[in-house]
Image (cartoon, helix red, strand yellow):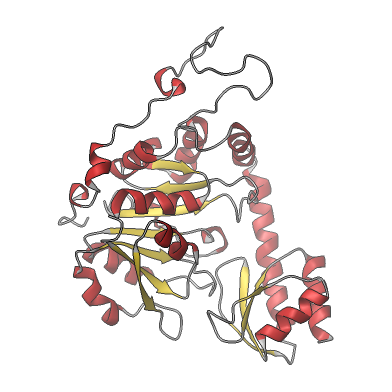
Amino acid sequence: MNTTFNINNLVRANIKALKPYSSARDEFKGTADVFLDANENPFGELNRYPDPQQTEIKQKLSAIKSVETNQIFIGNGSDEVIDLAFRIFCEPGKDKVLTFTPTYGMYDVSANINNIEVIKQPLINDFQINLNQLQPYLDFEDVKIIFICSPNNPTGNSINTEDIEYIIENFNGIVIVDEAYIDFSSQASFIKNINKYNNLIVSQTFSKAWGLAGVRVGVAYASEAIVALYNRVKPPYNVSTLNQEAVLECLNNQSEVSKNIDIILSERTKLKDALNQLDIVKKIYPTDANFLLVEVDNADKTYQYLIDKKVIIRNRNTQVENCIRITVGTAVENQKLIEALKNI
């Protein structure tokens, strides 16, 4: 545990003083015959507000992840997990956060929305953290959050575990480890460390391995104190009834999710092998995610060519020179991509 870290020294003063909104479903959580407390329409199938604390989801995740329910925050996508961190810990126009580039672009966007400066630390050649260059920033009082995406997007690789632990142990701010792609990786999740490190937030999502991108549900695992802060500032009904039901259905069908993950991993290997046979492919970077970062002759032209063939990938040329990012699809989708690239 980082013994010098004190969360009370990090939380914005207005958040400490904030009196959270108390919804009708916060004040009464039981069952009843008549509900006349929340000004809901008495007619319809979706006329009642959703559970503001997503109790059933937290109970199931608690059993799956071996954490307490009060160490789980359910958000409207991982983007809410990111945004609320800025609102809780960063004073607009004053504080800063640090990211390792290239990485997930939403950190920058959310920081800009909240008027927070972003310090960008370039990853070294194998897309790992350069601790020597990072060292001075660990003592900057104005740096309140460090974001670490592992496996990283768009590079696909996992960040060295020892480096992440070093940062958590030597930084007196919040470290957010974004594990959106962890289910495709052989590297262990950092969730097991939330009791060890009181300045750690682990972010995960139902959008990737769980196949619920359209549902928009993200999760943060952290200390009880941090989760309590998240619950204080979140909107009262931030995850809809339909979205909660979709997540619960998925959690009750983990075998199907596991089967799909195995298929994706198998297709990832086949896709990589097929791409390696193409002349336009110069390099395929190691990946622990459900996508491949691929260097080609000309990323812009390749991207546009594939659009013309109605095959859509992601052009990452502005982040990594002449690189495209290819999500692993079904066997049929992957084959269509390969056939298109063969004829470029």
Give the x, y percent position of residue 320.
54, 82
Where 50 falls versus 261 (above or below)?
above
Q: Nearer the viewer, residue 159 or 154?
A: 154
Q: In which image quadrant can residue 130 be found?
A: bottom left
Where 33 falls versus 259 (above or below)?
above
Q: In which image quadrant can residue 33 be found?
A: top right
Q: Nearer the viewer, residue 239 or 201?
A: 239
Where 68 falls versus 297 (above or below)?
above
**Farthest-out residue, left:** 4
Give the x, y percent position of residue 233.
37, 40
Give the x, y percent position of residue 42.
63, 14
Q: Quadrant of the N terminus?
A: bottom left
Tell me: 160 left or right of 134. Answer: right
**Farthest-out residue, top:** 33
Tell me: 99 left or right of 301. Answer: left
Where 134 falls versus 17 (above or below)?
below
Tell me: 230 left or right of 339. Answer: left
Q: In which image quadrant can residue 303 be found?
A: bottom right
Q: Quadrant of the C terminus?
A: bottom right
Q: Residue at x 27, y 68 (%)?
A: 166
How many numbered dots are placed on residues in this image?
0
Q: Residue at x 25, y 43 (%)?
A: 14
Q: Residue at x 57, y 18 (%)?
A: 40
Q: Nearer the viewer, residue 124 or 303?
A: 303
Give the x, y percent position of residue 18.
28, 36
Q: Residue at x 50, y 73 (%)?
A: 157
